[in-house]
Amino acid sequence: MAIQKVDSRAGWAARNPLLLSGEIGLEEETGNQKIGNGRQEWNRLQYFGSPGYWAEFSSDTDQTTTADTPTEVTFNKANEDNIGVKVISDSRLTIDHPGVYVFEINLQLSNNDTQIHDVHFWLRKNNAGDAGNLDLTTNVASVIEKHGGIQGANNLLLDHTLKLATGDYIQIMWAPTDANISLKAGAAGSSPYVRPSRPSVVCNVFQIAGA
């Protein structure tokens, strides 16, 4: 039967014990585990699995900005079962426990102009200025023009995996080439069929590994 020992993250790192083969060490404040192999000390072992921290955030309001101006995507709704991830100041997706996290972001784009326009999205870490911009996270979408009195629409999915520490936060930034581009929410529909309301943005965050 496996033996489980418990200590703080700092305590494990400071003691750096050699766990026996199959012996389990638990970090009390993070829920992360390591399993011994009888050969490597604690600090050389990889974390095993994850405690399953996750969250879903969304917005039921339209979001606008001026042309060519980096702006934070905001959230005003949170799943009541969220655990280990919270939103601060409406835009800062903040991690409570260290680990490897997947961010899946769905954006509902709308164009109220008669010309096609582009919009860029990217991730920003721990910084309200561009010093926090993360390399290789920019995506661009072209949104078709207004037609038949209906605003042009597009849907963009962003998917990134990040290794984060306690207290790290991620912001989703956007900058359209024209102010007629918005993030568009939608009311529930009843004709020609019943359908639920549409958020302007949804972000799901999943911890996939300890770190």
Image: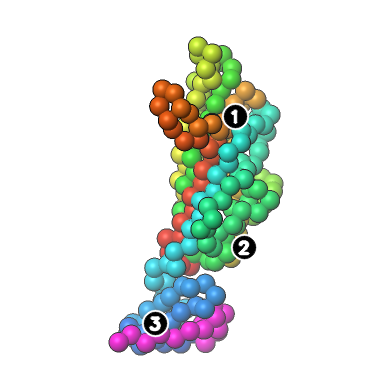
Residue range corresponding to the magenta coloring: 1-15
Tag count in the figure?
A: 3
Give the x, y percent position of residue 134.
Answer: 56, 48
> What's the CA distance linking mark 2 and mark 1?
30 Å
Sequence order check, earlier mark of 2 and 1:
2
- Which residue is tagged 1? 182
Label 3 secondary element: strand
Choose the circle earlier in sequence order: 1 or 3.
Answer: 3
- Residue 99 in the magenta stretch? The answer is no
- The colour style of the image is rainbow
- Placement of the N terminus among the 4 image quadrants: bottom left
| Residue 8 lies within the magenta run | yes
Query: Dot 1 lies on which element?
Result: strand
In the rendered image, residue 48, in percent from the top left (x then y), is placed at 39, 71
- Which is nearer the eye, 93 or 194? 194
Marks 2 & 1, CB-CB < 8 Å contact: no
State the residue position of label 2: 167
Q: Give left or right: position of 167 versus 44.
A: right
Mark-to-mark CA distance, 1 and 3: 50 Å
Please provide percent x and percent y for residue 103: 49, 50
181 and 82: which is toward the camera: 82
Q: From mark 2 to mark 3, how far is it between C-alphas?
A: 26 Å
Circle 3 residue: 24
Q: Residue at x 55, y 44 (%)?
A: 58
The disc labelled 3 sits on which kind of residue? Ile
Pointers 2 and 3 in contact (C-beta within 8 Å) = no
Residue at (41%, 77%) from the top-left corner?
A: 34
